[in-house]
């Protein structure tokens, strides 16, 4: 009801309150001039304020009672009526009318409060219904994403590790195609191409492509930005809406190894809108960095094994790549050191841990020498919280092998070393690995890397 309608309705109510008692009194005077208030044993005139009180509330009932009493007294004094309103009848009629008005006002207040609660409940129900509908859509979308994306980043890097093992330096068409298929599965790239540098210039034709291969658009603004700043470039969602000429690509990721050599560039022409987010592209950049570092890490592994000839080649190779991955992309990994405190330590505990290793983790048996029992565990993509979860898991494994006290009771000490900006040799040194200091310092000096004492 608008404001004008409310005003008209209010005028109608007060007009009815003033007119009805006067009309009823006039009719009674016309029928019973001498005894208008006592012509019948029942006081019919007081039904008017009673009914108006029940209909409109306390204030209209009081006004109607006042008008009826004043009109009756005035009619008697002016000679139109032979009887003034009896005091007892006036008091009883007023009490009945005011009671009816009070009842109606209280009932109206309760009804308004109940209606307000009902409106609030309906509003909340509507809001919850909308939220449930959005949650249901989000749940369905997540189900679709999980069906289409059944791997995690750990699984993706495990697949890249297997792919890198098949590569023998450089980037081949087979490896590039396998990389793009992995990116399509994990990052939901639908149309993309990998272009390599040939004679200092990006090749026009892609080495590998998703969907239909297309020539490289050298004038694309994202491509120029990615090459100039050597970092991932992409259009955000609001830019896609506002841009009239968005270029040929939705994202461009440079392929640069840890030595700083530009190997190529990955251009993404099409991907789902919900996949165009920083987290998804950061994961893609980490996978590209891991893939690009294969040849560089192989040379670094050879240098590391010159200082640590008994270090497993796969372990050294993976440690170097993960350290560089953290340096370039901020991806956390951890080294877990398990070392015997005495000669009485139970070697069976190490056997139990070694037999329960996960697919992506790497284990180095006896890293402290054949006479010092121990285990060095490399946990890729595991920060401090994941490392603590891993330690709880191995304690559960030991309890399953009837070693109730865990590693402490078996005589082993445990330490965590996060993989950070320090070079691999410094990380291994903090783990307690002994190596030839002279050859190590010479190698570090040759590489321009300082090693803190």
Image (cartoon, helix red, strand yellow):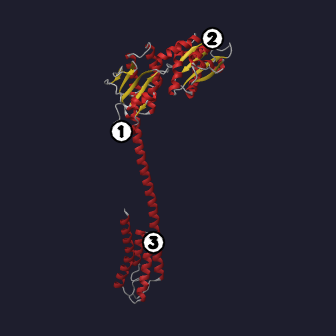
Q: Would residue 399 appear left or right of 159 to someone viewing this image? A: right
Foreground disc of the pair 1, 3: 1
Residue under label 3, please give it: 59
Give the secondary structure at mark 3: helix
Q: In which quarter of the image is residue 438?
A: top right
As displayed, is residue 385 above or below residue 126? above
Contact check, label 2 and label 3, Cβ < 8 Å? no
Residue 219: percent from left, percent from top: 35, 30
Residue in front for this viewpoint, 19 or 130: 130
For marks 2 and 3 on the same chain, the one whose residue lies earlier in the sequence: 3
Q: Where is residue 140 in the image (x, y as percent from the top left)?
A: 39, 35
Residue 373 location (% of width, % of height): 63, 13
Label 2 belongs to which residue?
Answer: 369
Label 1 sits on residue: 243
Image quadrant assignment for residue 444? top right
Query: For the residue carrying disc 2, how many other residues have a C-alpha within 10 Å: few (<14), some (14-19), or many (20+)?
Result: few
Mark 1 or 3 closer to N-term? Answer: 3
Where's residue 416, x and y in %? 60, 23
| Image quarter in which the C terminus is found | top right
- Is 181 drawn above or below residue 369 in the view shown? below
Q: Which of marks 2 and 3 is in front?
A: 2
């Amino acid at each position: 009801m608008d404001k004008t309608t409310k005003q008209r309705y209010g005028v109608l109510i007060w007009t009815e309150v003033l007119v009805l008692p006067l009309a009823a009194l006039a009719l009674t005077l016309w029928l019973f001039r001498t005894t208008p208030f006592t012509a019948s044993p029942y006081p019919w005139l007081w039904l008017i304020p009673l009914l108006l009180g029940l209909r409109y509330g306390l204030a209209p009932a009081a006004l109607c009672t006042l008008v009826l009493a004043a009109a009756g007294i005035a009619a008697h004094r002016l000679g139109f009526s032979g009887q003034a309103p009896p005091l007892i009848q006036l008091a009883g009629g007023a009490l009945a009318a005011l009671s009816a008005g009070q009842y109606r006002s209280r009932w109206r207040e309760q009804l308004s409060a109940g209606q307000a609660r009902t409106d609030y409940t309906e509003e909340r129900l509507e809001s919850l219904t909308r939220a449930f509908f959005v949650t249901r859509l989000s749940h369905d979308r997540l189900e679709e994403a999980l069906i289409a994306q059944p791997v995690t980043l750990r699984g993706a890097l495990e697949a890249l590790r297997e792919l890198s093992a098949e590569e023998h330096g450089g980037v081949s068409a087979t490896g590039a195609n396998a990389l793009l298929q992995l990116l399509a599965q994990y990052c939901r790239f639908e149309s993309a191409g990998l272009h390599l540098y040939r004679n200092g210039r990006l090749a026009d034709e892609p080495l590998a492509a998703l969907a239909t291969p297309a020539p490289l658009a050298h004038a694309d603004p994202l491509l120029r930005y990615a090459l100039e700043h050597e970092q991932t470039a992409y259009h955000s969602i609001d830019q896609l809406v506002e841009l009239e000429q968005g270029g040929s690509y939705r994202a461009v990721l440079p392929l640069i190894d840890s030595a700083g050599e530009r190997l190529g560039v990955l251009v993404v022409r099409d991907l789902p809108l919900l996949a165009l987010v920083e987290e998804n592209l950061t994961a893609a950049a980490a996978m590209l960095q891991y893939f690009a570092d294969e040849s560089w890490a192989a040379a670094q592994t050879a240098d590391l094994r010159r200082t640590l000839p008994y270090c497993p080649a796969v372990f050294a190779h993976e440690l170097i790549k993960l350290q560089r991955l953290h340096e370039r992309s901020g991806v956390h990994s951890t080294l877990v050191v398990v070392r015997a405190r005495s000669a009485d330590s139970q070697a069976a505990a190490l056997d139990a841990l070694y037999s329960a290793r996960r697919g992506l983790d790497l284990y180095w048996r006896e890293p402290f020498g054949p006479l010092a029992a121990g285990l060095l565990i490399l946990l890729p993509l595991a920060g401090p919280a994941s490392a603590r979860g891993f330690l709880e898991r191995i304690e559960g494994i030991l309890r399953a092998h009837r070693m109730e006290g865990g590693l402490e009771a078996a005589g082993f000490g445990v330490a965590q070393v996060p993989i950070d900006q320090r070079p691999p040799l410094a990380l291994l040194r903090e783990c307690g690995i002994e190596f030839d200091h002279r050859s190590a310092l010479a190698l570090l000096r040759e590489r321009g890397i300082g090693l803190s004492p």
